[in-house]
Amino acid sequence: GNLTPGNQVGAAYIYDLSGTQLAKLVPSDGQAGDKFGYSVAVGSGRIVVGAYLDGDNGSYSGSAYIYDLNGTQLTKFTSSDNAQGDFFGESVAIGSGRIVVGSILDDDQFNAGGAAYIFDLDGNQLAKILPDVGSYVGHFGKSVAVGCGRIVVGAWQFNGNNYGKAYIYDLSGTQLATMTPNDFANQDKFGFSVAVGCGRIVVGSRFDDDNGQQSGSAYIFDLDGIQLAKIKASDGATNDDF
């Protein structure tokens, strides 16, 4: 591709733990507009970089790349049913020997409902995750996390509104629990971000209004999806999106 500045091919950088740059990553087949580097993750001896607007399987189908810790590209991968407009690579995560990738506009279950995929560390697909049925879920896979033997997927649209919801799966893709906050409200966008580690799950709710309109908050859950606490910034203010 034409790797000139300004055309949004994208790049990613590797640093040591002191902040010293070790390498710059660019895709071997980068094209203008791919937005390589929109999502990144590191763990289990691998680096994964998402390029959600890559067009190998149609415009904005999306892809992801695996690198070793030195920045050598090992493989490029996508889902087995990747299609135009899926946004595969919007989110990526690595942990517990798994790579998880969100594809937020996948249409298998709902229009723009989204999906997430589980891969091994070589980029081989192991499972596709879809949300439980019963109510409309949109943008499932906007956020993904994996660790502590759990996969967490956020979906900030639920039941036709922007309440949001997050889901817990085992490493095989079996759903174990769902999470919603005990004080959720429309437009909170709970599930816009998720993380898991040290025996805890954290879910962001960027438009929660406790400290003013769209000030934002986050919630702590245990690995079974039981809410333990709500976090707000001590100086939170309108439009902070915490």
Image (cartoon, grey):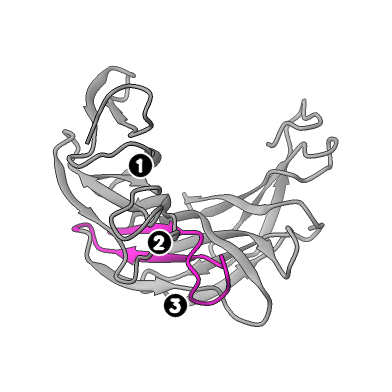
The disc placed on residue 174 is 3
Mark before the other along the chain sequence, 1 or 2: 1
Mark before the other along the chain sequence, 2 or 3: 2
Above/below status of 174 relative to 41: below
- Is there CB contact under 8 Å for labels 1 and 2? no
In front here: 192 or 51?
A: 51
Q: Quadrant of the C terminus?
A: top right
In front here: 53 or 156?
A: 53
* Residue type, mark 1 in image: Asp
Q: Is residue 177 left or right of residue 227?
A: left
Give the CA distance from mark 1 to mark 2: 13 Å
- The residue that disc 2 covers is 84
* Residue type, mark 3 in image: Thr
Residue 30, magenta (yes or no): no
- At numbered mark 3, what does the secondary structure look like: helix, strand or loop? loop
Task: From the image, state whether disc 2 or disc 3 is nearer to you.
Answer: 2
Q: Is residue 207 left or right of residue 123?
A: right
In front here: 59 or 147?
A: 59
Residue at image position (50%, 59%) is: 104
* Rendered location of residue 185, percent (x, y): 82, 57
Residue at image position (77%, 25%) is: 235
**Magenta segment, which residues?**
97-122
Mark 1 burial class by Cα count in 10 Å: few <14, some 14-19, many 20+ = many
Q: Quadrant of the N terminus?
A: top left
- The residue that disc 1 covers is 34
**Quarter of image, res 190:** bottom right
In this view, the residue farthest toward the bottom is: 134
Q: Is residue 27 something that shows in the picture?
A: yes
* Rendered location of residue 112, percent (x, y): 56, 65
Q: Is residue 58 left or right of residue 190?
A: left
